[in-house]
Every structure is written in structure tokens, then in C-alpha cells.
Image (cartoon, rainbow, N blue to C red):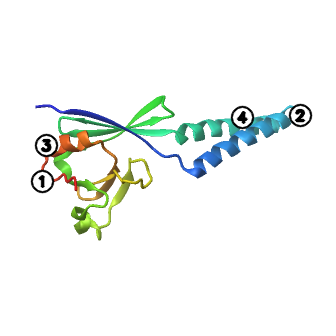
């Protein structure tokens, strides 16, 4: 039996990224006005405009999780226009998938992991983020829907916890 569940999570933009974007736009305007008189300022205006474009692109970030037949894939959607495949996880290689505050994760607290965050990035009330310990050395933060967690639990009931 094949399962298919999709989930979309919007990353909360950081204040620093917003400030960078606004600062680059302001610098672009200033350099463009000054560029009418001197060519180096026009070149600086073009450079800051390109920087503002990329800052804007990364300030609106979403993650899409797709669970299909024992595999979780994560895509990154930049500015609601560009999609990039980020990573794939096989359910067989998951050690544990549990809520971020679960007591089931207590035995993993003292281990060193490479941490990857594909969640909204902030603690919410209630916190719906999950921790996935993957392949022994990775800690992945996700924010899957309840349907996705149940679909994964149906194929790996001893690895997935809902508490």
C-alpha cells in the first residue's frame, strides 16, 4: 500500500534579513541618485540592487515535505516562485521521530549531532515541531502535519511517537 502526504511550512523571516533587505533597497536608491552624476555610484547601485533581490528571495522561504512510500523529501520554495529539492530521507534509516519536547528524546540529549532545521524556525504555542534523528549522526527539525506523522507511524510504529 502506497501512502502520499504533502505538507507546506512557512519559515518565519528573521528580523536581520528584513533589515538587510530594507537597507539594501535604501542604498540602491541613494546610489542610483548619486549615479546620475558619477559612474562608480551607478555601479554600486546595480550591485546593491542585486543584493536586495537575493535578500528578498531568501526572506520568503517555505519548506514542502512530501511523504511517498517510505520516503520523505524536503523541497525549499524561495519567494513562492523558485523550488529547489533539498533532501530525501528514507524511513528505514530514521532512529526516532518525536515532538521536540518529548521524553522519548531524553536518551539523545547528550549526543552530538549535525542539526538541520526545516521547520518554521521559531518556538510556537503549542510547539508542533518534531525532531528526527536520522542515520545516527543527524538531528533534523521538521514541522509535519498530523496526517504525515500518522502515515510515517503506520510504516514505522516503533520509531514514531506522538506524545
Q: Earlier in the sequence, mark 4 or mark 2?
A: 2
Other-residue count near label 1 (Cα within 10 Å), few / some / many at <14 / 14–19 / ≥20: few
Q: Position of residue 77 (x, y in %)?
A: 44, 35
Label 4: which secondary element: helix
Give 49 or 12, whichever is nearer the viewer.
Answer: 12
Residue found at x 81% / y 38%: 40
Against 152, is 127 above or below? below
Q: Quadrant of the C terminus?
A: bottom left
Residue position for label 2: 37
Q: Which residue is mark 3?
A: 154
Verify CB contact (< 8 Å) between mark 4 and mark 2.
no
Query: Label 1 to label 2, Cα distance in Å?
Result: 69 Å
Residue 134 seen in the figure: no
Answer yes or no: do the residues labelled 1 and 2 have beta carbons within 8 Å? no
Instruction: Point out the tag, 1 or 2, that comes first from the N-terminus.
Output: 2
Q: Nearer the viewer, residue 20 or 114?
A: 20
**Residue 153 location, x and y as percent?**
16, 46
Alpha-carbon distance for marks 4 and 1? 55 Å
> Can you see residue 12?
yes
Q: CA distance from mark 3 to mark 1?
A: 10 Å
Name the residue carrying label 1: 158
Of labels 1 and 2, the one closer to you: 1
Residue in the foreground of this view, choosing between 98 and 32: 98
Amino acid at each position: 500500500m502506497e501512502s502520499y502526504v504533502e505538507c507546506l511550512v512557512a519559515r518565519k523571516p528573521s528580523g536581520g534579513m528584513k533589515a538587510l533587505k530594507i537597507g539594501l533597497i535604501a542604498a540602491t536608491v541613494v546610489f542610483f541618485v548619486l549615479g546620475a552624476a558619477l559612474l562608480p555610484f551607478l555601479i554600486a547601485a546595480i550591485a546593491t540592487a542585486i543584493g536586495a533581490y537575493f535578500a528578498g528571495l531568501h526572506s520568503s522561504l517555505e519548506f514542502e515535505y512530501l511523504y511517498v512510500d517510505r520516503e520523505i523529501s524536503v523541497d525549499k520554495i524561495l519567494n513562492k516562485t523558485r523550488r529547489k529539492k533539498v533532501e530525501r530521507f528514507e524511513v528505514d534509516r530514521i532512529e526516532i521521530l518525536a515532538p521536540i519536547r518529548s521524553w522519548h528524546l531524553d536518551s539523545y540529549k547528550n549526543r552530538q549531532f549535525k542539526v538541520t532545521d526545516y521547520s518554521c524556525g521559531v518556538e510556537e504555542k503549542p510547539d508542533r515541531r518534531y525532531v528526527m534523528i536520522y542515520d545516527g549522526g543527524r538531528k533534523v527539525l521538521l514541522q509535519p502535519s498530523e496526517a504525515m506523522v500518522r502515515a510515517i507511524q503506520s510504516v514505522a510504529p516503533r520509531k514514531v511517537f506522538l506524545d
